[in-house]
């Protein structure tokens, strides 16, 4: 259990993890990106920690990353038993490496019955670091790397700053606006 908590803590260090990003915002982020671009975000489903949004064949797809038997893997994947890891960052990094080499491809089932499996290739991580444009945003990000959100009230800070630090969208203040 401690290894999984450490793994989830490491997510804060990687740019492709966006935290509490909605699926709508994830789609907006990837809309103008090339195929095989992706982001990892918190899952809004209470049985899963994480979800991944990726672009493949010109379409944007979502799948959950499940955690079972001390391993992370894709939910609804036909290759789940072969491609899991006890560390979620290592799991995603392995998928990126396999995608680069082309020697291994992951597939997930389509939500539409009768449709073919959807290939999952992760080649182009979309980094949240490119969207941190203010010192205020970067400072909040640095504080959250050091202290859990539920411990913010213990800090000797003005109430206004504590409220700012507790806001849930720590990674997504400056998303590009939608053109649609």
Image (cartoon, rainbow, N blue to C red):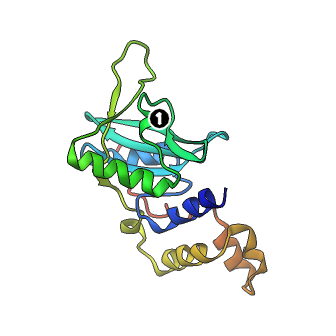
> Which quarter shows the C terminus?
top left
Q: Count the marks.
A: 1
Judging depth in this view, the residue of 70 and 118 nearest the camera is 70
Residue at (52% x, 79% y) in the render: 136
Q: Residue at x 60, y 56 (%)?
A: 4
Q: Is residue 108 toward the left or the right of residue 136 in the image?
A: left
Residue 33, percent from left and from top: 27, 48
* Residue under the point 72% across and 85% down: 157
* Furthest-bottom residue in this view: 156
Question: Residue 123 location in percent, x, y?
Answer: 27, 50
Residue matched to label 1: 81
Where residue 45 sits: x, y (%)?
Answer: 62, 39
| 127 relative to 69 in the view: left or right | left
Question: Relative to residue 133, is residue 128 depicted above or below?
Answer: above
Depth check: give the residue in front, 55 or 85.
85
Q: Secondary structure at mark 1?
A: helix
- Near-viewer residue (58 or 1): 1
Instruction: Specify whether 165 is left or right of 119.
Output: right
Residue 32 in sight in this render = no
Q: Residue at x 42, y 27 (%)?
A: 78
Q: Residues within 10 Å of mark 1 (few under 14, many from 20)?
A: few
| Residue 112 in view in this figure | yes
Residue reaching furthest to the right: 154
Q: Height in image: 4 above or below 81?
A: below
Name the quadrant of the N terminus: bottom right
Instruction: Give coordinates of residue 84: x percent, y percent.
Output: 47, 44
């Amino acid at each position: 259990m401690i290894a999984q908590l450490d793994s989830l803590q490491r997510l804060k260090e990687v740019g492709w993890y966006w935290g509490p990003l909605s699926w709508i915002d994830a789609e907006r982020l990837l809309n103008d990106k090339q195929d095989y671009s992706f982001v990892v975000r918190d899952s809004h489903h209470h049985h899963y920690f994480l979800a991944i949004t990726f672009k493949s064949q010109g379409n944007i797809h979502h799948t959950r990353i499940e955690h079972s038997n001390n391993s992370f893997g894709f939910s609804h994947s036909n290759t789940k038993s072969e491609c899991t890891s006890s560390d979620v960052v290592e799991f995603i990094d392995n998928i990126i490496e396999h995608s680069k080499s082309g020697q291994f491809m992951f597939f997930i089932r389509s939500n539409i019955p009768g449709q073919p499996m959807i290939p999952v290739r992760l080649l182009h991580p979309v980094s949240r670091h490119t969207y941190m444009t203010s010192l205020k945003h970067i400072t909040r990000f640095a504080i959250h790397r050091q202290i859990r959100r539920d411990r913010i009230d213990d800090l000797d800070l003005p109430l206004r700053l504590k409220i700012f630090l507790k806001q849930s969208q720590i990674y997504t203040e400056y998303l590009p606006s939608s053109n649609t």
